[in-house]
Image (tube, rainbow, N blue to C red):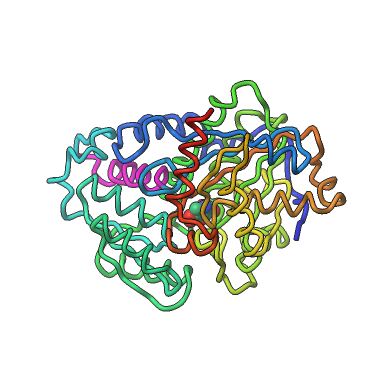
Amino acid sequence: MLIANPNASRNTYPDDLKAILNIQTAAESRTWLANWNTLNRAGTPLFSLPDLAAHLGVAELMIKDESSRSQLGSFKALGAPIALVRLILRLFPEHPFEPRGLLMGDYGDALKDFTVISATDGNHGRALAAAAQSVGCRCVIVLHANVSIEREQAIAAYGAQIVRVPGNYDESVEEAAALAVEHNWQVVSDTSYEGYEDIPRDVMQGYGTIAAEIVEQASDQAFTHVFLQGGVGGLAAGLASYFWELYGTARPAMIVVEPQQADCLFQSALAGHASKTQGSVDSVMAGLACGETSPLAWKFLHTSIDHFMTIEDEDAVNAMRMLAQGSDRDVPLVAGESAVAGLAGLIQLLKSPHLAAEVGIDESSRILLISTEGATAPAVYSELVGETAQSVLKRQHLWLQRK
Ligand SMILES: Cc1ncc(COP(=O)(O)O)c(C=O)c1O
C-alpha cells in the first residue's frame, strides 16, 4: 500500500527542526564515536548494484551496507552509544568526563554503579549493552515475547541483565519505564514519549553518521529517491533530516517503508499526527515490528517524507534472497530481515507503472537504499535465505577479490 504525504514540504529545512537535529551535532557525534573500538574505523561501504538497477529499469541503485558497521551487525551501533555518552555528560556535569574517553572505559570506576535500561526488539539493546560494557556501567535490557533466544544471547554476551515480559515491543517499553522509576535507573530508549525526548534525539542524531558517509562516498552523484525503512521512525528521521538540511529545496524524494502488520508511520501519515498501527505488530522484520510511532521522529517525518508504504513479510524474504544472490556485477550482500524493506518497497512500486509514476521513478532515477543490518539472527537468516550468512560472506569475499 502506498500513500502520498499531503504535508511533505519542499521548502528549506526549517529552523525549529534544525534546533533539534542538525548536521553540526551529527558531525560532533561522529567524531566521538570514531574513538569507540567496537566500530569499524573505515565506516561502511556504499555499493552500486548495476545489474539489479538494469533489471528494475532505473539508472542507478546504491546500497549502504550497515552490516559491517561493527560486530553488533546493525546501524544501531551508532545510536545508543552516543546517547549514553551525552546522557552521562548531562547527568554528571561536576565530573571532568572527556566525551572520547567515556567509550574507551576511562571512567569505569566512577560509573560502575550507574545503571541504564531499555526495551528492545534486538538491535538497539545489543548496541546499548555493548556501549555500557565499554563505558563500564550497568545495563538492563527488557525483551518482549517475540524476541528470539539467539537475539537474547547476543545481548547477554555484552554483560547486560535480561528481563523478559509477555506481550510486544510497546509493552516492553512500558516495563522498562516502570523498572527505571522503581530502581532509579536511566532509560536509554530509541523511541520518545511525553517528557522524554533528549535521549531519542541523541540516538537519531547518531544515525547522521550514515548520511555523512554516504554524501562523502557518493561525491557529486545526487540521488533522486531515498528509501528508508521504519520501525518507530528514528532511522528515517535521522537520515531524512540530514539530507533535507544539506540539499534544501533540492532534497531527494524520500519514501518510508514498513511491514503491513506494523504500519504506525503509515497510520500517522493518514491521521496527520503520531499514531499507532492497527496491525498485529508481528512481522518477520523484527526491527520494524513497532506498534507506536516515536512522536519526536514524527516531527521530522511529518514534513520530510513524500510517500509512506507497506510491504508483506514475503516481499522482504524475496529481497533478502535477491541481495544474497548477487551477480556478475552486483556484490552478494548479507542483508537481514529489517535491512531489505527499502528494496522490497522499490520492487513493489516498479511492478505497477501507475505506482512508479506516482513516486516519480523512471529510467533516469538514482535510488539510495540503506541495508540496516546483516544476519543479526543468524538462524532466522539461514532459514529464510536458504544459505548461511557465512556462505554468502564467502561468496562476497571472492567477488570483491575478483574486482
Ligand atoms: C535493522 C533495523 N532496521 C531498521 C530499524 C528501524 O529503526 P527505527 O525504529 O528507528 O525506525 C530497526 C529498529 O530496530 C532495525 O533494527
Q: Is residue 97 magenta?
A: no
Tell me if residue 387 comes above or below residue 403 in the rendering.
Answer: below
Q: Is residue 294 visible?
A: no
- Residue 68 position by quadrant: top left
Q: Is residue 348 left or right of residue 160?
A: right
Q: Is residue 78 magenta?
A: yes
Residue 111 is left or right of residue 16, and the answer is left
Q: Quadrant of the N terminus?
A: bottom right
How far across and down, in percent of the image, does residue 229 sit? Answer: 60, 51
Residue found at the far left of this picture:
109
Picture residue at 65% right of the left edge, 54% below the top: 257
Residue 152 appears in the figure? yes
Residue numbers of the magenta segment:
77-94
Considering depth in this image, is 207 or 351 the residue closer to the camera? Answer: 351
* Foreground pick, 168 / 149: 149
- Residue 180 appears in which quarter of the rendering? bottom left
Q: Is residue 117 above or below residue 361?
A: below
Q: x, y percentage for residue 338?
A: 54, 55
Please, which residue is most extreme toward the bottom here? 166
Rendering coords of residue 305 (x, y %): 68, 46
Query: Residue 31, percent across and down?
Result: 37, 29
Q: Quadrant of residue 158?
A: bottom left
Outermost residue toward the top in this view: 220
Point 35% across, 58% down: residue: 187
Camera-side residue: 84 or 281? Answer: 281
**Image position of 133 (left or right of 53):** left
Q: Residue at x 42, y 71 (%)?
A: 144
Q: Is residue 15 above or below residue 370?
A: above
Image quadrant containing the C terminus: top right
